[in-house]
Image (cartoon, rainbow, N blue to C red):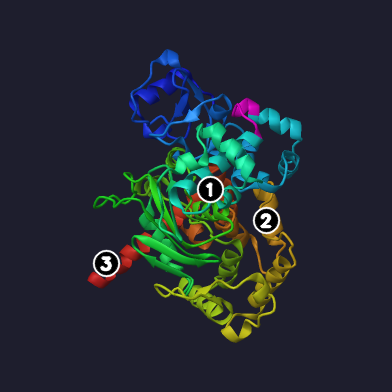
Amino acid sequence: MTLDAKSCYRAVQGRDARFDGRFFTAVRTTGIYCRPICPARTPLRRHVQFYACAAAAEQAGFRPCRRCRPDAAPGSPSWMGTSATVARAVRLIGAGALDEEGVDSLAARLGVGERHLRRLFEQHLGSSPQAVASSRRAHFGRQLIDATTLTMTEVALASGFGSVRQFNDVMRTVFQRTPTELRGSRTARPGTMSLKLAYRPPYDWDALIGFLGARAILGVEHVEAHRYLRTFEGGVLEVRPSAPRPPGARDGRRAGSLVLTVRGRSAHWLDLVRRVRRFFDLDADPLAITACLGGASELRAAVAARPGLRVPGSFDRFETFCRAVLGQQVSVQAATTLCGRLVKAFGEPVSGAEEGLTHRFPTPARLARADLSRLGVPRARGEAIRGVAAALARGEPVLEPAADLDKLISRLCALPGVGPWTAHYLAMRAFGEPDAFPAGDLVLRRATGLDERALERRSRAWRPWRAYAAIHLWTATHEEERNHEDHAVAS
């Protein structure tokens, strides 16, 4: 992002929420940096400077504001359009790429040299990859301090720090207070963790929860209009909007976050939060997506009707792979039924079930040796699931991200039972690739009146948001069919 100081200051004066997360304002007289929407009195122009990310402000010696909590700002530099390489690097860092490996390994995954990657970060973000990763750990650690009863040692490890000493040093540097001072006398209910997960409005909760509800796996998931529950390896989690939406507010413009509540414990809190953010597509920039897609004749009406539409993600890639394979050439309801049978037969039972949550989804090791034919699963699809399950059980990275979309699609198509449609569907949901687009999809072709080749050509104008174009067309078509059915019943 090119930070035009004049434009940034105007945004600060207007407290324009559309700029929240796009830059940060540092005040030299106080040593504090804030979000553009901070409710504090606007500082004089001569006293402020602007940074593209929180890590850069912290590296310059500023500490986060306690009122607007910059750590809760939505989005990340990956949405600022600075550099494709930096964007992907920030996404990988957010996925924990530097938690156990070095910058050299990250650069190799991106296909660039380590020195070049460092130069790109300095050029576009004014910070280093390590500083971005350290800032991410520190702010997540702050969330755990506020929301859980974990000990400081547990918080340090859950945040991705290699030692308690490193955790204490970084927290002191970033917040200028010790972890114990940050917690103070606040306490959380034992056995639970509750965090607010910020997003950029508008956010179409109704459409996303409707999509998940139609595909909820019996025993693993429970979906209601205002909350989503599921089992995971450490307990049960719940996701709901942070505040009730006013009547008729379909896109949730007044809400800026979802609330994640976890009942249980996890050795990988940071990974758990990352998976939930991906599942609910909380890092998208709807304004940028709308600006790109809203002008297309095929998409204009759909985008205008649901500007906050998100691409439903994936909590677990293997689970989504199984769902996609079982859903080939059958209805959504039939695929959901098969998934329920799979869970009942091979899932791990959980104790203290609530809302019908009785099992965890089967592990790859369990399905690698399972006979799926007795559940009514076609032989070829059963073998496809068993083959990928066996590979994962052996530790093979068959469902790991690739350097770019083309490489990911190629790798997925090499898996048994996966063709181009399934590969793009998995890229959209399981890997969060915003440009994935199954041009051969029958519904997309009917909605646009184009054949596969023509649709592929037309979709190039929608890059890099083709996955959102697909979900808009699918949703609009489904609503149109439902309206026709309601009209027929009324008639």
The residue that mark 2 highlights is 400
Name of the residue lying farthest toward the bottom: 374
Label 2 secondary element: loop
Q: Which mark is residue 455?
A: none
Label 1 secondary element: helix
Calculate the distance from the C-alpha at mark 3 to the C-alpha at mark 2: 45 Å
N-terminal of the pair, mark 3 or mark 2, is: 2
The residue that mark 1 highlights is 466
Q: Which residues are magenta?
A: 122-129
N-terminal of the pair, mark 1 or mark 2, is: 2
> Closer to the camera: disc 3 or disc 1?
1
User: Three-letter amino acid code at disc 1?
Assistant: Arg
Q: Residue at x 51, y 41 (%)?
A: 179
Name the quadrant containing residue 413.
bottom right
**Relative to 230, residue 11 above or below:** above
Label 3 secondary element: helix
User: Which sits in the foreground, 438 or 29?
Assistant: 29
Asked if residue 127 is among those painted magenta in the image, a careful observer would answer: yes
Residue 86 percent location from the top left of the image: 63, 36
The residue that mark 3 highlights is 487
Q: Is the C terminus in the top left, top right, bottom left or bottom right quadrant?
A: bottom left
In the image: residue 184, left or right of residue 83: left
User: Three-letter amino acid code at disc 2?
Assistant: Glu
In the image: residue 383, left or right of residue 300: right
